[in-house]
Image: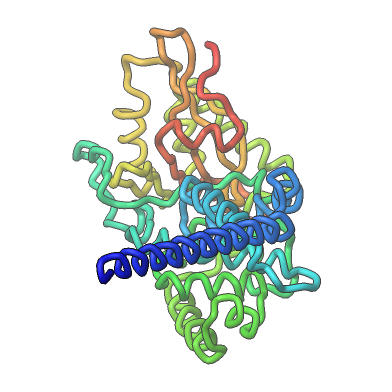
Amino acid sequence: MRSSSSTSGAGATFEKKGLAESNMARKEEANREKTDRMNEVLIPDQAEYSRVIEPYRRELLLHCYRLLGSLHDAEDAVQDALLRAWRHFDTFTEKGPGSLRRWLYTIATNTSLDLLKKGAPRTLPTVASAAWDPMRPVAPRSTEALWLEPFPDSWLAEATENPEARYTRHESVSLAFLIALQLLPPRGRAILILSDVLDWRAGEIAQWLEISVAAVNSALHRARVILEKHYQREQPEIVPFGDTNAALDTLLSRYVQAWETDDVDGLVALLKEDATLSMPPVPSWYQGRNAIRRVLSTVLFPPDVHKQWRLSPTRANGYPAFVVYRADEATRSYRAFAIQVLTLAGSPFPKQVASLTAFLGPELVTSFGFPLQIPQ
């Protein structure tokens, strides 16, 4: 009898356990269905999401570029940020004008800050070391340093100008400004950009970055002090590339002709006496007409090679720029070689090249809307 009773009790226990597990399974399934129904309401389908979000992509690219100093990293950051936004669209609860834009900027900012934790600040050769002796061989390309990358003005044109901001949209992507930004700690850099470029109020920054207003004001003060020490707002004779004029067109036409006809003397004649030439990722850079002349004559225009360059005009970081192609006899074509960015000096109109920064490598060319190869 004892054995029969024990067996009966065990069976009842298993029945209760099975019933409980079944109820739990039904409850979990109901919760999943409820969650799915909520997601259908809160998370739009991909087509609808793209329609709402895509108009912000270019300005988010510009924002991430200011933070990161790299066009490629900015593209990765925006792609990741928009994916995060889609996955967490149900957390967007703010209403009112501009709230979606601020929410997206917050996600893009935090995504960029995550990337900045993984790498060192970016720079340019003219900042990283002293000028190179032109009698020494050109240094090999360096993969140890992280270099700034140029930004296409065609993307900048889509950004809105805020008259209340401390820095204009063109100044905020100038190479000099970006170099100074790289001296700031990542969060301080983000706060300064949000405040002094995008003209966000301290309270807005504090709310969206989930820190106190006092912390925002403190970080902003430190960032402004560092920027004031290391960034000199461009002098009047340095002319950003805006509306064209006859003097500017003439200078740039002479510049292109000198490159394409191997005219080293003509090219040097367009330079300021203390002009600089740099070619990241090559760490060596050169200053002065004589030093640049030697590099041009021995490296870029060797006597046994003729008419190997073709230049296509574009704009980068608010300045005149060129996509540079190099001849490839094997394919009888010109292959993308670099993006050149010029700063110009002269008053009232630019008459000389103050600096020439050639960002070597074909990978940037397509971002400027140019092909990797053109026919001879």
Residue lying farthest to the left in this orientation: 136
Residue lying farthest to the front in this orientation: 1
Residue 154 shows in this picture: yes
Name the residue located 80 percent from the left edge and 73 percent from the top edge.
Answer: 96
Residue 173 shows in this picture: no
Q: Position of residue 221 (x, y in %)?
A: 50, 85
Name the residue located 62 percent from the left edge and 69 percent from the top edge.
Answer: 197
Residue lying farthest to the right in this orientation: 97
Name the one closer to the observer, 318 or 203: 203
Instruction: Specify the quadrant of the image occupied by residue 289.
Output: top left
Task: Please state if 7 lies on the left or on the right of 87 as rendered.
Answer: left
Q: Position of residue 170 (x, y in %)?
A: 63, 58
Name the one closer to the observer, 317 or 104: 104
Q: Position of residue 327 (x, y in %)?
A: 44, 17
Q: How many marks?
A: 0
Name the residue located 33 percent from the left edge and 58 percent from the top edge.
Answer: 119
Name the residue located 60 percent from the left edge and 72 percent from the top edge.
Answer: 194
Name the one closer to the observer, 275 or 269: 275
Q: Position of residue 117 (x, y in %)?
A: 36, 64
Above or below 128: residue 290? above
Instruction: Specify the quadrant of the image occupied by residue 207.
Output: bottom right
Q: Quadrant of the N terminus?
A: bottom left
